[in-house]
Structure formats: C-alpha cells, structure tokens
Image (tube, rainbow, N blue to C red):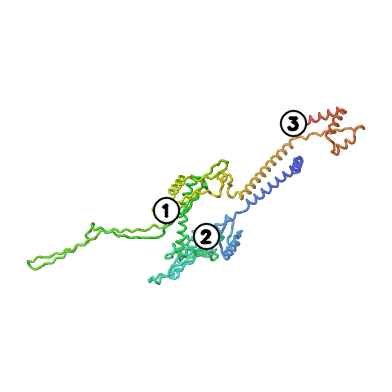
Amino acid sequence: MKQILDNLNTITGKFTFNQKVLLGGISVAVIISLVIFSTWMQSEDSSVLFTNLDPADASVALEELSKQNINAELTNGGTTILVPENQVHRLRVDLLAKGIPASGTVGWGLFDGNQYGMTEFVQNVNYKRAMEGELVQTISAINGVKSARVHLVLPKNSIFKKMQSDATASIVVNVGRGQLSEHQVNGIQRLVSGSVEGLELTNVSIIDQHGVELTSSYSNDGIMRSDSQLALKKEIDEYLSLKAASMLDRVLGPERSLVRVDATLNFEQMQQERKYFDPDKTVVLSEVLDSEEREEGAGSKEVITTNYELSQTVETTVGEIGGISSLSVAVFVDGTYAEDEEGNMAYVPLSDDELTQINNIVESSIGYNSERGDRVEVVNMQFQFQDTPEVAEVGMLPEGWMQTLPELIGRILLFALAAFMILKLKKNLGQMALEDNRPKPRKQKTIIDLDEDDDMPSIRERASGHVSTERMVEEVKGFANDNPNEVADLVSAWIKDEEEVATV
C-alpha cells in the first residue's frame, strides 16, 4: 500500500495545480455517479395496490399490510397505496379475499350463488343495486371521470297507463380538476338512457362534485334541437367558405381574398301521403250469385253481384331535414400592384372579365343554384392591412416568435458551453499526457561578473523593470563584445536543450 501511495504521489507531483483540480473533479463525479447508480439498482420499484380508497378502507389495508411486514406507502392524499412491484399481485388477491377494500362497487355478480328463499322485494333491491354498480363502473372508465355514483328510480309497472310513472336517473361524477365536454355529457346521458328500460333521455340528470348541473342545456328538447341546428349551420358555412377560399388562394395568392357564406337551412319536417286510383285497372274482389225459382212454367231468376277493387298507389313523402334552402356568398378580392413612373408600388383594380371569372369560380365551388335563390357578390377592393404584397411577405415573421426566441438562445448557449467544456477537457488531458513524457530541460545558470566599470544604475533599472528597449539592446551588445566566450557557451546550451526537446 505504501508503494502504491508513493507511486501516486510521484505521478500527481508532476501535475500542475489546474490539472490536479480537474482530476479531482472527475474523480468526485465518478464516485457520485457510482453511488447513485448502486442506490438506484438496490431500490425496489413500487406499484399501485389500490387507488381511490376511502379513509376507512385505506386504514384497514395499511393495518393488514403492516401485519405481513410489507413496506407500504400512502400517496395521492391518502387514497392510493403503493407496495413493492414484485408483490403487488399476491397482496391484491390476498386483501380482496379478506374483503379489503369493502367499499367497492357491486355489479351483476351480486346474483352469483344461491338465490333460494329470497323475497321479491330483496330481488328488486338487488337488481337496482346491480344496475347502478354496472353503470358506475362503465362511467368511471370514461376518460376524465375519476369516480361516479348513479341513483336510479325504477317505478313499478302498472296496468293503467295514466298511473304509470317514468323512470329517472341522477348521476354524480367526480372529474377532479378537469371538465367534461358537451359531447361526453351527452354520451353519458345516452349511455344511461339506453341501459335502463323505459328511461327517457330528458330524465337523466348529471352533476359534478361541486353540485353544478352539467345537463342544464339539454333539459329542454327544444333547446337541444336549436343547439344542434346552429352547430349544423356553422359547419356548413365554414365548409363552403373554406372550399371557395382555398381555390381563390391558389389563383390570387394567400390573404388576397375573403369569403363568407351564409346558408339558410330548412329544418321543417313534412310528411305527405298520396293515394292514386287507376280506374282502368280493376280487380274482381268478390261475386255473389242470387237465384230465385219461380212457379211452374214461369222459369227462374238469377242475380249476380260482382265487387271490383280499384288499383291504387300510396306515395309517402318525407321532407329533407337540414337541407339548404338558399345560399348568400360575399367575396372580397384584392387587386394587383405595379410600379408607376416614379418607381412606387401602385394599386391596380381587377378588370370586369377577371371579376366575372372569379364569380363563376365561386359559384361552381359552392354548388350555386339559381332556382332556389342563391346569391354571389364579388367586390374588388384594396385591402388595408397590407401595403404591397412584397412588403407583406418580407416583413412577415412567424407567429409567436417572441416566445420561442429566448428558448432558442438558451439552447444555443447551452450547446456552446458544452462544446467549450469538451474542448477544454480534451486540451488539458493532452497537455497532461505530453508533460508526463517530456523530460524537464536543464536550467543553465550563468554568472555574470560585474566589473567596477559597470553601470550600476542600469542594473537597478533592469531589476525594477523600468528600462527601455534601446537601452537593453545596447547593454546586450556591450556585454557580448566584452565577454564573447561566455555568450558562446550560453548559446550552445540553448541549442542543445532545444534539440533534446525536439527529439522527445
């Protein structure tokens, strides 16, 4: 050990102070990385045993786990229990077999087992509990819903229709910090309405954990119909506007046109039934023969009655719901820009032929129909939000560039800092390897004897560093003239040292 320490001291003694600091930093970083990695390898991963637990169930579960010497952790506000990952499945089966947690929802499994001796009242109660439990499990599986509770009111069937009550449902959903969309609320309504017999969509009420009713806009059938009609109109307007604007952008250029479509839709539901009779086409429906015998010699009388069925055609017509009654289209187009005599960009309106062509293009793209009263108006007007197309294109910057600029600068500085540190480390390591293999040059000690005639003030000036360059050159020349042998020996020693360094 002493020999190893001596070798280390010999090696580190050749390093400079900066090299020792760098080597020490690298050693400390390696040791810290090894400690962290070994700690991470020895730590056991945790997995969720149960979640969304009541405080009572969580306390019972922790007590049972402590009896088995299991290192359990309670997180998420006391509703989630974490255990070692390699034991999660065994512990989950073990606790469920002991009835922990006890506040879980029940479903159709409630009817498993022996049902003998159960009264009709108990069966009806269990049926209602099982239906509510199945709906709770289904609703809780929807994205955004943490938990749910369902209350059903299922009236008894009556032989009298006027005495029959409607089924109702009340649902409480816990959405945490989020919020359900209108489509999700409508989907939950339809899910519950379709799962319970005799439950109408309007009899399903949904509220959140704060007591806010989420189905207020759907309680009235007329309001729901109006919302759907307005959404359909917006969708048609946007679709036709985008269809015409995309075509004009390819012809005129981006942001050189503006298209707005207003569609009038027909939501009247009309059903007509017509019957057509064809007198030329008859079918014998029945014949009745009535005969009468008269007195002897007077003969007999027969009466035949024939019933005919006329051929008829029944035609039922149902009017289209949401069909387009008429379209009104407004189109603004920008003109062109050309240089005038002074070299400035001047606005040039479009010609009548160009406007007619644009009008025909718009009519074709939206499905123009003159019989239903469609109107298309094309107006040529200079756009005020831009000076010229060239200025607008050159001066345009990406939207949100002010937010992304600091992030971009930070990434560039981080990359430059990393590159500088890598180059610096590489340079220091190269110098360390070179200095270890390079022999130290011999120091030449030259003793200069000063005669009594030497200028002592000049020596003092050299010692203090306040000597001029001309004075120093003159003194070197004078010393070389007075001591040629010593100067030759000094130059020879310098040349020999340089040759030894070059050889290494």
Query: Which of the pair 17/97 is nearer the observer?
Result: 17
- Residue 374 image label: 1
Q: Position of residue 62 (x, y in %)?
A: 59, 62
Indicate left or right for 461 with 391 as reference: right
- Which badge, 3 or 1, comes first in the chain's sequence? 1
- In this rendering, the label closer to the viewer, 2 or 3: 2
Cα–Cα span, label 2 and label 3: 80 Å
Could you classify mark 3 by the number of other residues whose Cα lies within 10 Å: few (under 14), some (14-19), or many (20 or more)? Answer: few
Amino acid on which the number 1 mark rests in the picture = Asp
Residues tagged 2 and 3 counted as in contact (Cβ below 8 A): no
Q: Residues within 10 Å of mark 1 (few under 14, many from 20)?
A: some
**Disc 2 residue type (three-letter):** Leu
In the rendered image, residue 445, in percent from the top left (x then y), is placed at 84, 34
Q: Quadrant of the C terminus?
A: top right
Please count the marks in the image: 3
| Left/right of residue 3 with respect to residue 145 in the rendered view | right
- Would you say 380 lies left or right of 487 here? left
Whether residue 378 is visible to the viewer of this picture, yes or no, is yes
Instruction: Residue under label 2, please give it.
Output: 180
- Of 132 and 369, the residue lying toward us: 369
Q: At x 87% / y 37%, what residue is drawn? A: 461
Percent coordinates x, y for residue 425 in the rendering: 69, 42
Which quadrant does the N terminus fall into?
top right
Residue at 37% x, 58% y: name it: 319
* Other-residue count near label 2 (Cα within 10 Å), few / some / many at <14 / 14–19 / ≥20: some
Label 3 sits on residue: 502
Picture coordinates of residue 420, whole percent (x, y): 68, 42
C-alpha separation, residue under disc 1 versus residue under disc 2: 40 Å
Q: Mark 2 or 3 closer to N-term?
A: 2
Mark 1 element type: loop
